Amino acid sequence: MQDYLKGLNEPQLEAVTHINGPLMIVAGAGSGKTKVLTTRIAHLMAHGIDSFNILALTFTNKAAAEMKERVEKILGNTEARNLYIGTFHSVFARLLRAEAHRLGYPANFTIYDTDDSRSVIKTVVNELNLDDKHYKPNIVGSRISAAKNALMTPAEYALDHFIQQEDMRANRPAIAQIYAAYASRCFKNGAMDFDDLLLKMYEVLKHFPDALHKYQHKFKYIMIDEYQDTNPVQYQIAKLLAAVHENICVVGDDAQSIYSFRGATIENILQFQKDYDDVKVVKLEQNYRSSKNIIHVANEVIRNNKGQIPKNLWTDNAEGDKIRLVRTMTDNDEGRFVADTIQEQKLRNHYLNRDFAILYRTNAQSRSFEESLRRMGIPYRIYGGVSFYQRKEIKDFLAYLRVIINTKDEEALKRIINYPVRGIGKTTIEKCVIIANEQNIPMFDVLTRAAEFGFKAGTLEALQNFVTMIRYFQSLLTEKNAYDVAVQVGKHTNIVKELFNDKTTEGLARYENIQELLNSIKEWIESPANEDGEVGNKSLGAYLQQITLLTDADDDKENSDVVKLMTIHAAKGLEFGCVFVAGVEESLFPSGMAINTREELEEERRLFYVAVTRAKQRLWLTYANSRYRFGQLVQNEPSRFIDEMPEQYIDKSYAGGGARNSTGFDQRFGGFGAAPARKAPVSRQPSKPEYLPPAPPNKVVEHKPSIDFVASDVSALQAGQEVEHQKFGFGRIVAIEGSNHNPIATIQFQLNGEKKIMLNYAKLRIV
Ligand code: ATP
Ligand code: MG
């Protein structure tokens, strides 16, 4: 037996060595699906199948790169470089360079990202004399995207009775017209958006038999990972390509189907057996990734979904720790708990940063983790999303605050001078920049003296109004704190209102992010002392100073030793030693927007299953009693998924934090922030403290020092003292930092150099 086959279990071996004919692997999480796919590619090549004839479609480009690398390692030659491995989008973008001319596109067609695409939609909407406030580019864009993913042309869209009814009900009857205009504009610009990369590939195969023939014979062996999440276009393309040789191998887990909102349907899995004769089906049930406790919990929770393909996922791995269920008072406490625990685990169990992942349901949740991790000096990286402080809406908002404090900040000024749109066009801005350079004065001074520089009346007025607004904000500085000024900015600029009125998913996310930023400013105001201990200075200037330090992001390289933060969607297919699943609360996870139908709820449960099964050894589920959401302090109950986990696999604990000021501030934007559709329920009582320990708040009960000797009184330690550490020997304390309940000392040891030591766990003695 070849070396690469050793260690595979029986069904894995069966799947890997099945060479010809359709093959479907339906298997649970961590059962080696991706491993089987990779090994099978190597096996095919070892059996003389030309690497040029193999197509493997993965979920991420990273997975593709890893696969190539592993195949190369197994075979010990460079043949793997000829494989077509990648995501649907990346592989088809490559093929379309050679084929797009058939559809009239240039070979060097541009690929529009979502921003580009939205901006084209906006142009088209205006050209059709429609109102882009009503026909919002995001809303229109998602309708068009859905149509493309369902293989629907503009003409078909216009003729589809059901869709027309839907658009009429939403009072947007012209979407069909916009779709047609958008498609022809993209075509004229020689551009394809992301959906086109699939759609145009399909059209090439469908309408050009010679092209279809060519690729059917090129890709004699086709493999698709994460098949449960393919959408109808992807499904159709795969079907066309595989139609002659039928050497198609799909790999999936119906319990991990989490993209139905993008048009993916698990029907694909069920349909596969009908599409081909003689499908070989292999089930993998042994999990190699996770501890027994993790697998038990995952199995028990997913059991609540009706209509799953029955599977019995089991593992030979160690029982492992119980799953830690940790309740905190607030989202900020949740952030602190996670950062503290990472620090503790690194010291106690010798983990590296890269062994940890923090997974959450929505991007907006990353903020409290980012802050705590930065404070503790733990490097991290946000995957599949933009770091909170790097997000456009946050940067725009902070740019206002920067200009208020320092009008010379030209970068910030350029960001906001016409945001939200106030009729100060590109030409005007360019002119301002030129004048500023000629006169050698700050750009803001050009605005204040605009009357001298011959602007048109309308432009002059817009510039003067802008200056007046900034001056007004500045007038608040002496009396108001940072939070009050920020609220005024949100209100007077109309930013919050605009985002609030944007009812798309992205709009909602942006609105939530701004709320989250305001919440964090409020908490900073309410905290007794600044991070450096300075009490009382709550001015905007002081706030910006500390936030500037926070935005000074590290330039993390791929694979560097960092804690990973990502949404659960982005974590699909990945694995980590230690996983925190955060915000396991009703209305957040399951999402409050996805509990209206059984289908929606079951998708949330599958998402929970995906989250839990990312962990190899240790798993924490955290939830906060209260968090600010939608501008309200929301009291949350624990997620129903928690109730679905059998008690015997769970360790419950409480990681406190001070009680927080519960002043709601729904009225802060003059009331519109409190519109019912956006308002999360606040009437519920705090969840029953059924496992609130008798310990006082502010103590992290979870952190019981398990080591026999702890320095008798941590607070007695100070910089300059000589100490003895059980392992590192004699040394001198250089500094003590970290939070009050988790102080960390930097100690210069005589023999072991400088080390950071957590005093709560250190085996330390004052000498
Ligand atoms: P997911 O459902 O999350 O996509 P998966 O089914 O694709 O998971 P893999 O990622 O392929 O699972 O494998 C999970 C882990 O188990 C990997 O670390 C892999 O190397 C390991 N593994 C799989 N099969 C075996 C085996 N036969 N022996 C040892 N380790 C294995
Ligand atoms: Mg996988």
Image (cartoon, rainbow, N blue to C red):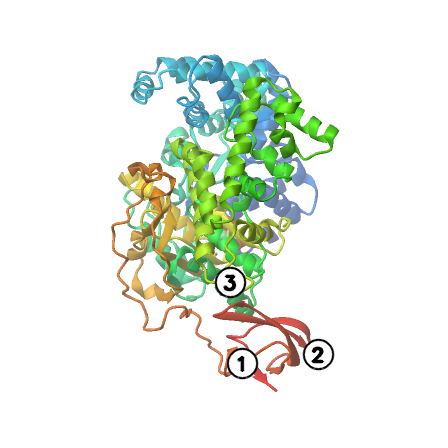
User: Toward which corner of the image does residue 431 lie, by quadrant?
Assistant: top right
Instruction: Measure the C-alpha gap from mark 1 to mark 3.
Output: 23 Å
Label 3 SS: loop
- Judged left or right of residue 397, residue 668 is left
Reading the image, the residue beneath label 2 is 751
Determine whether label 3 and label 2 are within 8 Å by CB.
no
Query: From mark 2 to mark 1, how far is it between C-alphas?
Result: 24 Å
Q: Quadrant of the C terminus?
A: bottom right
In this rendering, the answer to whether 598 lies above or below 179 is below
Residue on which the image places disc 3: 535
What is the number of the mark on residue 36?
A: none
The residue under label 1 is 716
Return the x and y of residue 18 as percentages of the image width and height: 50, 41
| Residue 317, horizontal then vertical, whole percent | 45, 63
In x, y percent, where is residue 213? 56, 20
> Do the residues under discs 2 and 1 have CB atoms within 8 angstroms?
no
First in sequence: mark 2 vs mark 1: 1
In this rendering, the label closer to the viewer, 2 or 1: 1
Mark 1 residue type: Ala
**Label 2 amino acid?**
Leu
Q: How many marks?
A: 3
Dot 3: few (<14), some (14–19), or many (≥20) neighbours within 10 Å? few
Residue 253 appears in the picture as rendered: yes
352 above or below 629? below
Q: Is there any visible trace of residue 394 in the rendered image?
A: no
Sequence-wise, the earlier of marks 1 and 3 is 3
Residue at screen point 44% across, 54% down: 523
Circle 3: residue type: Val
